[in-house]
Amino acid sequence: MKRNRAALVTSVSTAILGAGWAAGVVGTAVAAQDSTLTTTVGAAGTQSSSTGTATGTSTSPSASSDPSTSASAAATDPAAAATTPAAPAPAKPSGTFAGADVRTRYGNYQAQITVEAGLITNISMLQSGASDGTSRQISGYALPRLINAVLQSQTAKVAYVSGASYTSQGFEVSVQDAMAQAGI
Amino acid sequence: MAVDVRAPITTDTYEHRAETDSAWKDTLESAFWLSGVGAVSLMLAAGAPIANLGDALTTIGRATGIVAATMMMVQLLVIARVPAIERRLGHDRAALLHGRLGRIGFIVIFVHVATLVLGYGARVHSGWWDQAWSFALHYGNEMTLTVIGFWLLIAIVVTSLAAVRAKWKYEKWHAVHMLTYVVIGVSIPHQFVNGTTFSGNAMSATDTFARWYWAMLWTVSVGGFLVYRWLRPLWHLMRHQITVARVDRNSDGTISVWMTGRSLQRLHPKAGQFFMWRFLAQGMWTEAHPFSLSRSPRGDVMRITVKPVGDHTAAIADLLPGTKVMAEGPLGRFTAHHRRAHGTVLAGAGSGVAPMVAILEDLDSSGPIVVFLRARTASEIPHLDEVRELAHERGATLYLLEGRRSKGWLPQGLSATMTQLAPAIAASDVYVCGPEAWAEAVLDEARACGAPKEHLHREEFAW
């Protein structure tokens, strides 16, 4: 191949790969942003139908700054609050709370937590990722570990399971949202 | 060298052709390369984490999978005998590229499998053994098929290596080689179902694009292969009704097969090209063999000349008139169309004389022509009378290089440089067809006498 043509092909290749890489980085960043947004939305959704208004607002300040998002979310995400019983006591809430449905590259994740007297006693997955072999195996490995970690530490911010970053992220965001609804 | 007043115009045409051809060749190669680059880029766009060992291995595994698949596509295309590719890349170079990609491709596939087994194993803390079984059993039908295909591929590679060592017959080796099409076939579904880049899980615009892009590449390569390897020969059979008309046993030991058919000129063969011939007779229809035309179609008659060297070629002598023939082609760039210079030197030996007869007939007498025919004795040269007559008509100089084999391009006991026998060698195209060692010797001599590389043309049925 002539030198100038080879140079052209090389630079075009570099440009294509560079664009792909950039898109990958931006895509991941956007995905992270998206899921944060989804959480906010889920928490805001609780506002309209549960009594834990004060808690909801305080944990998600961005919700109040974006009323259009919360409005649409209230319409599209009624499930989040459906099972929520009223939590009248100022402390120690109990009941089951479904977290936000978090969309990731490898499918949707939605956690449901059972709270007894302010403590998370059980976590079940309403949605646990895409159904292809890869996702099933990774989720099948990571989710039990993540659930155990949350039950033990009683916080959503548990260490990521390495090699399962999307699963970890989706799970964490959804649990965080459920906890916000429960007011713990 | 004296300036030839006719030269400028012709030379321009030749240079222009050479330029167009090289541009085409580069375009083809760039297209192959860039389609792979595009696929890897889409993989990066889908997210390629390398934060820990498991992720990094998985990313390498995904990339090598895409590279291996792209190589398979190119392999299919270059062996599909698409006329545009045959003309620009040349049949022998295409076959060479096919083989090279195959050898590298196997290693790439191996890396793809190894890194994914280890990478997934690291991510879910299963051992590589458990992970390998997990792929085979728990990843769905597409994956199970692919794992079977992978083991089949290993079996094929091992058998092929053994075949080379045991000097199997080409036909036997080829039968095993055909199984790689099965491997390619079973590996395609898992790319769309399990391949992160092309599975469309995320349902984003990039994902949808990647899926379509990949589907398009496979459609072009598999489609091209099916159309040119299967449909086109069948279409030729129906349309041209090529039929064996007569079989001659020539005095030099070769066999001439005369074939008739309908509008054979529409096959557009150029003198010096060959077809893959499949004679639809019992015991022969499973094999297609390459033979050059020793006479281009004229009045719906054409001829090949075959030297009986194996079972199949010997059986050709017993072909009955009326036998139907399937022809894939025309193939090869061993034609006067690819001339680059003013003069022409033709060198043929054995069955390599056949294309020389056709090329000589095709040449006009505008430039000096020298013909070398190599044989032990002149009585072993096929179509010698015909060559003599044509040489006379074209004003060509004919040398019969008779005698026993030597290391050089001339027979034992003779010594001369090519410049002495073909004075215009430095400004001539050199066409060589014959046994490999001799053909190499001729090309070496031509180079030594000043013929530039782009003037050298060689036909080898290199498989």
Image (spheres, grey):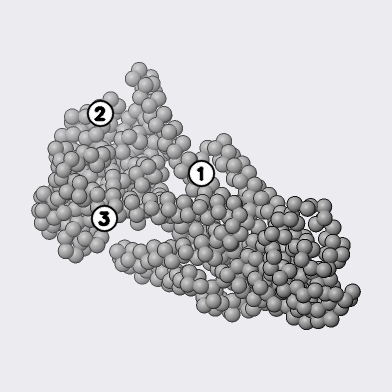
How many numbered dots are placed on residues in this image? 3
Lower sequence index among marks 1 and 3: 1
Left or right side of B448 for B392: left
The kind of secondary structure element at disc 2 is loop
Q: CA distance from mark 2 to mark 1?
A: 36 Å
Q: Are marks 2 and 1 on the same chain?
A: yes
The kind of secondary structure element at disc 3 is strand
Taking the spot 35% from the left edge, 67% from the top edge, the residue there is B176
Comparing labels 1 and 3, the label whose residue is closer to the camera = 1
The kind of secondary structure element at disc 1 is helix
User: What is the chain identity of the residue bearing mark 3?
Assistant: B
Lower sequence index among marks 2 and 1: 1
Left or right side of B71 for B12: left
Q: Nearer the viewer, residue B226 or B411?
A: B226
Comparing labels 3 and 2, the label whose residue is closer to the camera = 3
Left or right side of B384 for B34: right
Disc marking residue B30: 1
Proximity of marks 2 and 1: CB atoms separated by less than 8 Å: no
